[in-house]
Image (cartoon, helix red, strand yellow):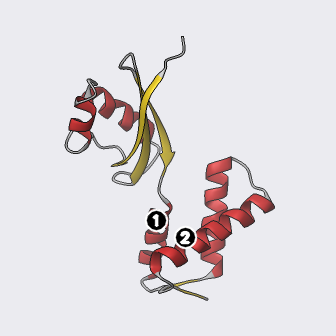
Amino acid sequence: MKHILKESFIITVPSNKPTTGAPVGPMIGQRGLSSNELSKEVIDITKIYHDDVPCRIEICVSKEKKMSIESLGIPLSYYLKSILEINQSKTLSYKQLYTLARYLTIKKYDYYDESVLRSMYKQVLSYIKSVTDNKIIIE
């Protein structure tokens, strides 16, 4: 039986942690759902990531008050921040950008294709430029 969707929303939560507190708990509670059930499902779908990694979750609520949860993965900003912290500077090499784009391509599409990789590389590059106001030097 297919459930008719009432609403859908996306939240970012730390992986492998219970999410019963604010703001997630009250948001789920006012929709008549159990925050403990949500917490268990979030831990279940984020167990593939390291602890405390921010993970985007889409929660769909049906009119019958049933919820379905899907992981949308880790935000691009987290990957970039990790690279910059490892680098300890405000410079990125083209090799780092390529490696990040390749990783994201494989993660998102489960395969490696030159055209898709080129597109992902452009997305990563434009994201970096827009977020950092061109303060990152790409060498």
Q: Position of residue 73 (x, y in %)?
A: 50, 49
Which residue is drawn at the image coordinates 47% and 87% (left, top)?
Answer: 135
Q: Is residue 65 above or below residue 99?
A: above
Number of the label disc, if any, that sits on residue 77: 1
Number of the label disc, if any, that sits on residue 127: 2
Q: On the rendered structure, is 104 left or right of 86?
A: right
Which residue is drawn at the image coordinates 47% and 57% (left, top)?
Answer: 75
Which residue is drawn at the image coordinates 48% and 73% (left, top)?
Answer: 83
Q: Check the image and name the residue furthest to the top.
A: 1
Disc 1, SS: helix
User: How many marks on residues?
Assistant: 2
The image quadrant that residue 93 belongs to is: bottom right
Which residue is drawn at the image coordinates 21% and 37% (left, top)?
Answer: 26
Q: Tag 1: Cα neighbours inside 10 Å, few (<14), some, or many (≥20)?
A: some
Disc 2, SS: helix
Q: Position of residue 55 (x, y in %)?
A: 42, 49
Q: Quadrant of the N terminus?
A: top right
Of tags 1 and 2, which is closer to the observer? 2
Q: On the rendered structure, is 130 left or right of 20?
A: right
Foreground residue among 78 and 3: 3
Q: Position of residue 126 (x, y in %)?
A: 59, 73
Q: Amino acid at mark 2?
A: Tyr
